[in-house]
Image (cartoon, rainbow, N blue to C red):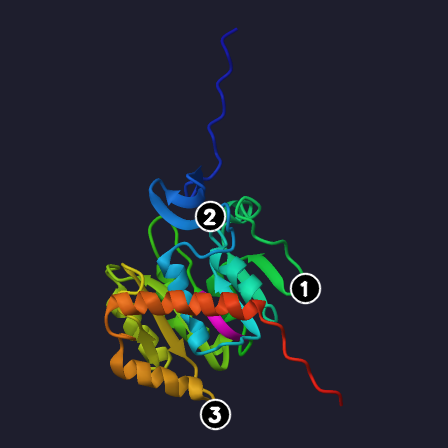
């Protein structure tokens, strides 16, 4: 009897190639396409920020130095999540990651387990951000895939929802490639959603343009600080100075977390 024909594979095609983890020279990286590093970790210092764009995103502390709740879009290798978890010990962190196979790598990148103030949620960030209002002091949008920034994470409605998610005085930090063909359109949408309260630091992270957008609050000096930066638009001017600024912010946060908390007086 001839062999029976095998049924055709009816499983849906994989939308994204599996993430690639590489370990070499004391460093572990996460890549969605070979050679395109999405996240990097030093094995000897797993909580350190290796990539310039990650250090640049931490400049939100210039506007919100002690956030109560940080929401992150995109887990990746967990660099930003680990740093914020360690160096903002009083903040609650919520990380939204679409891909289960990325979340499954959290142990390889020393991402801490969920606890009372740290949660990783598998969800579509567009739906999640749109479902909440006035619940975060900082929103970090770093949700890339193999093709770059998904269009939905740069849409007009998404930025409107980001503004709604933030509390008064809160700050959105968006990581966008400067060579993205939709960059100017996304910048215009951000300006519209946040009333032109937008600033950035030129040359701080190579081709990564890190945009900061503030939701103003009553009598809030954060919006005033952002307005002063908006007037210049490029931070300290030269890219070298802006990169130095990011390193100093990270160093300040690392040292601050090690300082003893001031004692409260008796009541």
Mark 2 or mark 3: which comes first in sequence? 2
Furthest-bottom residue in this view? 219
Which SS does the magenta portion mostly show? strand
Asked whether 7 or 129 is in front, the reply is 129
Disc 3 on helix, strand or loop?
A: loop
Residue that carries the numbered disc 1 in the rendered image: 116
Q: Percent x, y for residue 96?
A: 52, 60
Q: Is residue 84 above or below residue 195?
A: above
Quadrant the C terminus occupies: bottom right
- The CA span between labels 2 and 3 is 42 Å
The residues colored magenta run: 136-140
Q: Are marks 3 and 1 in contact (CB under 8 Å)?
A: no
Q: Give the percent coordinates (x, y) of residue 106.
A: 55, 48
Local crowd at mark 2 within 10 Å, few (<14), some, or many (≥20)? some
- Circle 1 crowding by C-alpha within 10 Å: few under 14, some 14–19, many from 20: few
Q: Is 263 situated above or below 71?
A: below
Foreground: 261 or 52?
261
Q: Is 261 within the magenta?
A: no
Q: Is residue 19 left or right of residue 206?
A: right
Residue found at x 39% / y 65%: 247
What secondary structure is marked by label 2?
strand
* Image quadrant in which you'd find residue 259: bottom right
Indicate which disc residue 218 carries.
3
Residue drawn at the location 52% of the way across and 65% of the way down: 128
Quadrant hosting residue 172 = bottom left
Residue 94 visible in the snapshot: no
Q: Which mark is residue 7?
A: none
Residue matched to label 2: 42
Mark toward the start of the polypeptide (3 vs 1): 1
Please tell me which residue lies in front, 207 or 102. Answer: 207
- Left or right: 91, with 41 as reference point: right
């Amino acid at each position: 009897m001839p062999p029976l024909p095998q049924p055709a594979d009816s499983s849906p095609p994989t939308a994204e190639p599996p993430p690639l983890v590489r370990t070499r020279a004391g460093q572990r990286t996460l890549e969605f396409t070979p050679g395109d590093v999405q996240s990097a970790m030093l094995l000897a210092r797993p909580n350190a920020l290796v990539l310039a764009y990650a250090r640049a995103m931490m400049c939100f502390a210039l506007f919100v130095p002690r956030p109560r709740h940080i929401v992150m879009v995109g887990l990746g290798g967990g660099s930003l999540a680990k740093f914020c978890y360690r160096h903002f010990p009083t903040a609650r962190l919520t990380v939204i990651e679409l891909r289960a196979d990325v979340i499954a790598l959290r142990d390889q990148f020393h991402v801490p387990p969920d606890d009372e103030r740290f949660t990783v949620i598998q969800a579509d960030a567009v739906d999640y951000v749109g479902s909440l209002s006035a619940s975060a002091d900082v929103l970090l949008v770093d949700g890339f895939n193999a093709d770059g920034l998904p269009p939905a994470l740069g849409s007009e409605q998404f930025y409107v929802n980001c503004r709604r998610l933030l509390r008064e005085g809160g700050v959105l930090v968006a990581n966008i490639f400067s060579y993205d063909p939709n960059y100017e359109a996304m910048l215009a949408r951000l300006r519209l959603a946040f009333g032109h309260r937008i600033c950035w630091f030129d040359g701080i992270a190579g081709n990564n343009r890190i945009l900061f957008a503030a939701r103003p609050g009553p009598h809030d000096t954060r919006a005033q600080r952002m307005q002063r930066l908006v007037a210049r638009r490029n931070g300290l001017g030269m890219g070298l100075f802006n990169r130095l600024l990011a390193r100093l912010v990270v160093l300040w946060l690392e040292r601050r977390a090690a300082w003893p908390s001031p004692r409260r007086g008796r009541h």
